[in-house]
Amino acid sequence: MSGSLLLGSGWHPFLFREEISALFGDFEVLHPRLVLLDKSIDEKLLSRLSRAALVDDLLHFGGYSDVSDFDIISEKISNWSKENLPSGSFAVRSKKLGSGIEGVSRRELEKEVGAQLFSKKNPVDLQNPQYEIVIIVAGKVEGEVHWDSVKITPCIIWGIRENKWEKTNYIGRQPMERPFFKPISLEPRLAKLLISLAHREVINPQIMIDPFCGTGGIAIEALIQGMDVFASDLDPTMVYGTQKNLLWANKDDKTIIKVEKCSVKKIADLWGGKENCIFVFDPPYGRNAWKSDDGLELFLSALEQALKIDSQSVISTMLPAGSESLENNPDVDYIVMGRPWSEIEREINERGWRVNLRSPVKVHKSLARMVVVCHPLH
Ligand SMILES: C[S@@+](CC[C@H](N)C(=O)[O-])C[C@H]1O[C@@H](n2cnc3c(N)ncnc32)[C@H](O)[C@@H]1O
C-alpha cells in the first residue's frame, strides 16, 4: 500500500489544506476535505501529522471513484481490499461528507464489501476489529461557512484506517480547565492551527515566540509539541497567569520556558538573536490594547522585532475583521484591524515581510478574524 489519505475537518477545508501544505508540501486534492500525500505512513509522517489541528482521519489510500453505480463501486472496493487487507479481523465503516451520493447507500456498501471479504483469514469483528476498511461517500455541501477555492465533485474514496493515528483531543486543556483563565484565551484548536501554519519544509521549528501571550493559549500548544517557548506580555497579571499555566502543562524538563513582562516594542532586546523560530500570536485589539496603544501599531512593532530576532522566521497570526470578509471576494478591499486590507499589506511589506496566506475565519455573526501568515520578503 502506498499513499496517505487525510480527511480534513469540515469547519474550514481551505485552512485544512493550507495546514497540510505547510507541514508536508505538495499533495493531490481529491475533494476539498480529502487530500492524498505521495508518502506511505511511517513514524516520521505520524510525528509530523501530530502537529496538525484540522485532520480528522488518516487512511492508507485504497482508491477513488466518481462513478455512482453501486455494483461497480462495491466490486472495486472489494477487489482492492482482498489484495490489501492483512490477515486479521476487520470491520467496514463508512462516512458521509455533505449530502452523500444519490443511489449509493452507505449501509448497503458496508454490508456488500463485508460479505465479499469475510473469510477464515478475515473474520468480521464490528466491536474491536484489527483493521477498518473506511469508505467515504463525499457529496455536495450546502451553506459552507468558509469560502473555498476547490469545488466539490461527488466521489467515493476508500482505504484502511491507520490505527496508530489519533485525532487531537483537547479534553483537559480547554481554557476554562487551566489554572489561570481569562475570556481572551485562544481556543486550543486555533492556537494549534496558527502554529502548524507557521511550519515550512520538513524541519520542525525549535522556538515559538509569542509577544502577546495573555493566558498562554498558544504557548501551551507549542510546549506540548516540544518547542522552546519565549512568551511575553505587557500586563504583569498575564505574565503570572502564563507562567502558572505553563507550569501546569509542562511534562518535559528538556524544553526551555521563558515568560517575561515586556512591551512588544522591546522583545528583540529581551530575547536577542535566535534561529529556527516562529512567531505566533493574536495581537491586542479594542479593550485588550494596553492603555493608549493602537492594535495595528503593536502588530507592526511585532513584525519589526521578529525580523530582528530571526530574519528567517515565519509569522502566523489572527487579525480582527468584519464578518463581510468571510465572502473572500478578491475584488473587495475588506477592513482588517480597522483599515482596508491593501493598506495593512503595504505596511507588512514595508517591514520586510510578504503575506503568504490570508484567510478569514468566522468568530460569530458579526465578527471574523483574518488568519495571516507572513514569510520574510528576502
Ligand atoms: C488578545 S490577547 C492574547 C491572548 C492570548 N493569545 C491567550 O490565549 O490568552 C492580547 C494580549 O496582548 C497584551 N498586550 C497589550 N498591549 C501590549 C503591548 N504593548 N506589548 C505586549 N503585550 C501587550 C494584552 O495584555 C493581552 O494579554
Image (cartoon, rainbow, N blue to C red):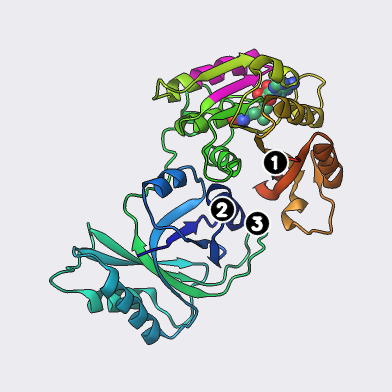
Q: Of the numbered discs in the image, which one, if any, rests on residue 375? A: 1
Between discs 3 and 2, the one toward the N terminus: 2
Q: Is residue 232 magenta?
A: yes
Residue 26 to residue 299: above or below: below
**Mark 3 near ligand 1 (CB under 8 Å)?**
no
Q: Nearer the viewer, residue 164 or 92?
A: 164
Q: Position of residue 340 (x, y in %)?
A: 86, 45
Q: Which amino acid, by three-letter code, is at mark 3?
A: His
The residue labelled by disc 2 is 25
Residue 227 to residue 324: above or below: above
Magenta residues? 229-245
Q: Residue at x 67, y 28 (%)?
A: 310
Q: Where does the C terminus fall, quadrant-wise?
A: top right
For the residues marked 1 and 2, what is the alpha-carbon distance in whole angstroms?
Answer: 15 Å
Q: Nearer the viewer, residue 186 or 349?
A: 349
Q: Of the numbered discs in the image, which one, if any, rests on residue 184? A: none
Residue 295, by quadrant, is: top right
Question: Total label count?
Answer: 3
Q: Position of residue 271 (x, y in %)?
A: 64, 18
Q: Which amino acid, by three-letter code, is at mark 1?
A: His
Q: Position of residue 53 (x, y in %)?
A: 51, 45
Q: Secondary structure at mark 2?
A: loop
